[in-house]
Amino acid sequence: MALKRIEDLDEAGALDGTELVELQSGNESLRCTTQEIADLASGGGATWGGITGTLSSQADLQAALDAKAPLESASLVGAPTAPTAPPMTSSAQIATTAYVDAAVAAGGGGGGGGGPSTFETSPISAGAIDISDEDVSVWVVELTENVTSISLPTALAGEALSLLVIFTQDATGGRTVAGWPAAIWEAGSPPTINGDAGSVTSVPLVILGNGMIYGVS
């Protein structure tokens, strides 16, 4: 096969470095790629894409690398962003402003002084009241019939919920409250509800993430 010069090749200026070239030296011949020849011509430096030569000879590239933040003790400016972690994440991950805002809105702002408590009224349905919403800290229950079943919220592991249940007797009075979940009561037993018409009885509770419930009776 007749030898050709580079200028004789079609699209000679579009070499990608993978073309094979045969070199003749005396009685010996060898093959190498055009990239290997380019490396030798540049003094043996490395190749990054279309950039050849040693790193120190690439002044603009070195300047760009120097402008990057280091991995350790980086000092960032402007408004750097990061992924927002799921709620209740407990790790060394960065907490974004979106994560903090969501935690405060959910009542996770440190407990006490973070904002007003939320309250709801709970109707009685066939003797049962459901006050299991962990986002509500004060429940008002009007006693229009006897209560025989009470559903309380469940705290997550490592957390504690403070709950206040306010029972108000209707105009008839004499309503009773029973059906509390297993709890440790300050007086040794569940509270006795004042039976007078229109009277009010408050029951403070603390619910822990380990399943324990403590109440003041």
Image (tube, rainbow, N blue to C red):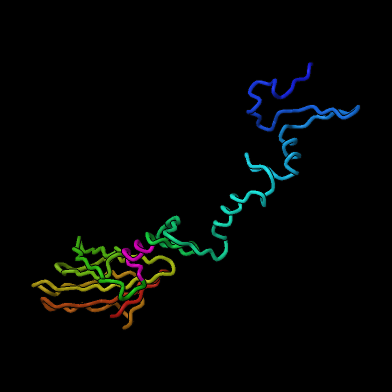
Q: Is residue 192 magenta?
A: no
Which residue sits furthest right?
27
In the image, residue 72 above or below residue 52 = below
Return the residue nearer the eye: 130 or 8: 8
Which residue is pictured at 20% across the width and 70% down the height? 140
The answer to whether residue 214 is left or right of residue 200 is: right
Please give the count of numbered marks on the rendered protein.
Answer: 0
> Which of the 4 image quadrants contains residue 110?
bottom left
Q: Which residues are magenta?
A: 100-109
Quadrant for the C terminus in the image: bottom left
Return the residue nearer the eye: 112 or 84: 84
The answer to whether residue 11 is left or right of residue 109 is: right
Which residue sits furthest bottom?
187
> Measured from the top left, where is residue 208 in percent x and y?
39, 71
> Which of the 4 image quadrants contains residue 186?
bottom left
> Measured from the top left, where is residue 41 in percent x and y?
74, 39
Most common SS among magenta residues: helix
Q: Is residue 107 magenta?
A: yes
The answer to whether residue 22 is left or right of residue 138 is: right
In the image, residue 53 above or below residue 97 = above
> Measured from the top left, where is residue 37 in percent x and y?
75, 35
Return the residue nearer the eye: 173 or 84: 84
Which residue is pictured at 43% across the width and 62% down the height? 95
Which residue is pictured at 35% across the width and 69% down the height? 109
> Measured from the top left, where is residue 162 in percent x and y?
32, 73
Which residue is pictured at 29% across the width and 70% down the height? 180
